[in-house]
Amino acid sequence: MFTLLTHGHVSTCPALYSGKIEICEKNCEGKRYVVTGILSLIAALAEGGFGFFKSLSLFSDGVHASADGAGDFVGAWAAKKARRCPHEEATARKRGNKAIAVLLGISAVWVIFESFERMLGAYEVDPLFMITLPFVALCIHFLRFRILHGSPFKNETLSGILMHVKGDILITLLVIVVGIISLGASVIHVNPKWFDLPFSVLLSLYLGVYLAPKIWSAKAHHHH
């Protein structure tokens, strides 16, 4: 992790000492995506686990982070395939994309139904969780961006992942804003769920209607 942050290589990469980028591609690309994928899933578990009980907006952001984490693992898998059997790389990326798109679409539909159900019933939102947990996730996304941006090897897969990390940062910032609004609403005795649930529906529509089809139809060489 430390050498990824400071030099853009894992500590065992020969390119760290030789400076040969082609060696780095073979040794670091997949490992870099595994590290960022794990970080993304940590953010997803924190937001999704607590968000299910405290805030559906938070939960929806966790779903988005989990999809990006899965995308990073697909990138690592495809990089490994490319080293062993270059002609199988496109197939690996395509299969991974479709699996992520299906899971993302199912999750988005479920969150939308759950949001409407909670609108009609008793539902307690904790605005403090909507502020503190996304802040932790935001720090993780900035760490992911730093690791990926420091990569000495540039390709379209890396550019796609960086684009989605920027999207993660933006959406998590929006969740924090909704959390602040919800906190203000609770102070004046307005139920925060009327801010949390509509945003969770909008975010789920983005995930299910826009992002999932985009991932499904993504080009084979580009896993985001």
Image (spheres, helix red, strand yellow):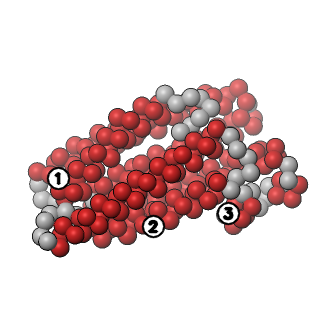
Q: Element type at marker 3?
A: helix
Tell me where residue 24 appears, x and y as whole percent: 78, 49
**Which residue does the numbered mark 2 point to in the structure image?**
136
Q: Secondary structure at mark 1?
A: helix
Neighbour class for label 3 at 10 Å: few (<14), some, many (≥20)? some
**Amino acid tagged 2:** Val
Q: Earlier in the sequence, mark 1 or mark 3?
A: 3
Question: With 111 as the anchor, is 11 left or right in this view?
Answer: right
Seen at 56% across and 37% down, the residue is 223
In percent of the image, x 82 and y 58: which residue is there?
16
Question: Label 2 vs label 1: CA separation?
Answer: 26 Å
Q: Residues within 10 Å of mark 1 (few under 14, many from 20)?
A: some
Q: Note whether residue 66 is visible.
A: no
Marks 1 and 3, how far apart in space?
Answer: 42 Å
Which numbered tag is attached to residue 118? Answer: 1
Q: Which residue is mark 3?
A: 5
User: What's the residue at 86%, 59% (across, down)?
Assistant: 17
Cα distance, mark 2 to mark 3? 19 Å
Mark 2 element type:
helix
